[in-house]
Each structure stands twice: as structure tokens, then as C-alpha cells.
Image (cartoon, rainbow, N blue to C red):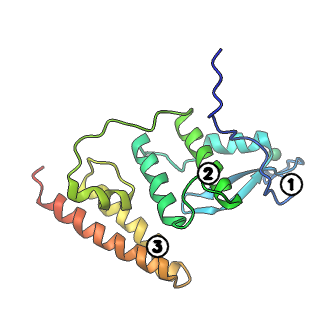
């Protein structure tokens, strides 16, 4: 028998549960398990009982239409942007909770733990940073980049983030990355 100690306990009750009932209509159980409300808002959660968090996770369309590589890149991009001062896996309850959430997301995105190394086609060196910022995996099309830019620019616009300086910085980086990607892709023969 093979024991997989590294497998995250994705469905352990959350110690941060606010002690309210399950969000599923008509359910009388405690909401001890959290699930992100939406793709655009990973910091707000529904709270469900175990059965309903599983049902919710199964039907959640956060990653619909994305390849596993894109999902992973998205998780990484989210990690490096949202918590610049708390590298993944360092001390701190918030960090551990975040880590558990990301493990949970990965679990239901991939069905099980998978090797982190995926074969990658040759990425043009000058595009690596831009792709990382966009959370995209090479090769990409101009259309994908444009669509992603729209989403990111909206999400990280200072107006949507209480005028946050960090959001302004992120938007600046997004704009630079967009210019780089667009320049390269528009010039490339199809
Ligand atoms: Zn329930």
C-alpha cells in the first residue's frame, strides 16, 4: 500500500469558519468548509457543509475552458501578485490558509496531485516575464492575450482597488507585459 503523506487534506474543516450555517438553501448543517465565491473574487467565500462544498466544487466553473497548464500558471500568478510578502509555505496562519486553499483548488482542478513539471514548448526568452504576469502558458494567440488583458486590466485597475498603489504597480506591469506580448505576436507569422 502506498501512503501519500504529501496529499493536502483538502476537506478538513476550516478553523476560520465563522460558525454560521451552510450556505446551501434549506441545509441545517454547519458551514465549516469554504469555497471561493467567484473567479474574480478569491477572497470571499461561501461556507458549506462537507456534502455541499463537494457539490459546489464539482460544479464550480472557475477553470472551465482552461488547460491544466493555464490553471497552474494562473494559480502561480495569483500567488505572486496577491501575497508578495508571504512566500508560499512560510509561517503564518493566513499563509497556511492560502496554501490550503490553493491546494484545494488544484485538487479539484486536476482531480489529484500531479507532477509540477509539465513539458513546455520553447518560450521566447523575452516573453517569459510577460507570460508569467499574464498567467498564460506558451504558445498563446493574440486573441487570448487581448482577452486576458481585458480581464486583468479591469481586475487590477486602481479604481477597482480603492486606489491601491500596489494595484497601480500591477497595472503598470500588466500594461508593459501586454505591449511586449502584443508586439511579438502581431509581428509573428501565423
Ligand atoms: Zn449543507
Secondary structure of the residue carrying tag 3 is helix
Q: Residue 131 at x, y = what percent?
A: 32, 57
**From the Cβ of disc 1, is ligand 1 less than 8 Å away?**
yes
Pointers 2 and 1 in contact (C-beta within 8 Å) = no
Nearer the N terminus, badge 1 or badge 3? Answer: 1
- In the drawing, what numbered circle is on residue 156? 3
| Alpha carbon separation for disc pair 2 and 1 | 24 Å
- Decide which of 90, 45 is in the foreground and name it: 90
Q: Residue 143 at x, y = what percent?
A: 27, 57
Q: Nearer the viewer, mark 2 or mark 1?
A: 2
Q: Residue 17 at x, y = what percent?
A: 80, 56
Q: Which residue is mark 1?
A: 21
As drawn, the residue found furthest toward the front would be: 91
Residue drawn at the location 86% of the way across and 58% of the way down: 20
Q: Nearer the viewer, mark 3 or mark 2?
A: 2
Q: In this view of the protein, can residue 134 be seen by the observer?
A: yes
44 displayed left or right of 52:
left
Q: Nearer the viewer, mark 1 or mark 3?
A: 3
| Alpha carbon separation for disc pair 3 and 2 | 22 Å
Q: Which residue is mark 2?
A: 99
Amino acid at each position: 500500500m502506498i501512503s501519500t503523506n504529501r496529499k493536502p487534506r483538502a476537506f478538513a474543516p476550516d478553523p476560520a469558519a465563522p460558525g454560521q450555517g451552510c450556505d446551501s438553501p434549506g441545509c441545517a448543517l454547519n458551514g465549516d468548509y469554504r469555497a471561493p465565491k467567484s473567479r474574480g473574487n478569491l477572497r470571499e467565500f461561501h461556507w458549506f457543509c462537507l456534502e455541499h462544498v463537494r457539490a459546489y466544487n464539482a460544479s464550480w466553473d472557475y477553470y472551465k475552458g482552461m488547460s491544466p497548464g493555464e490553471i497552474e500558471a494562473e494559480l502561480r500568478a495569483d500567488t505572486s501578485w496577491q501575497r508578495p510578502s508571504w512566500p508560499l509555505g512560510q509561517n503564518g496562519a493566513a499563509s497556511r490558509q492560502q496554501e490550503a486553499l490553493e491546494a484545494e483548488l488544484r485538487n479539484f482542478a486536476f482531480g489529484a496531485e500531479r507532477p509540477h513539471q509539465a513539458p513546455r514548448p520553447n518560450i521566447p526568452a523575452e516573453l517569459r516575464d510577460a507570460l508569467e504576469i499574464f498567467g498564460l502558458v506558451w504558445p498563446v494567440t493574440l486573441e487570448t492575450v487581448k482577452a486576458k488583458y481585458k480581464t486583468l486590466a479591469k481586475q487590477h485597475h486602481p479604481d477597482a482597488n480603492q486606489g491601491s498603489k500596489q494595484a497601480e504597480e500591477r497595472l503598470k506591469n500588466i500594461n508593459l507585459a501586454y505591449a511586449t506580448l502584443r508586439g511579438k505576436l502581431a509581428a509573428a507569422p501565423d
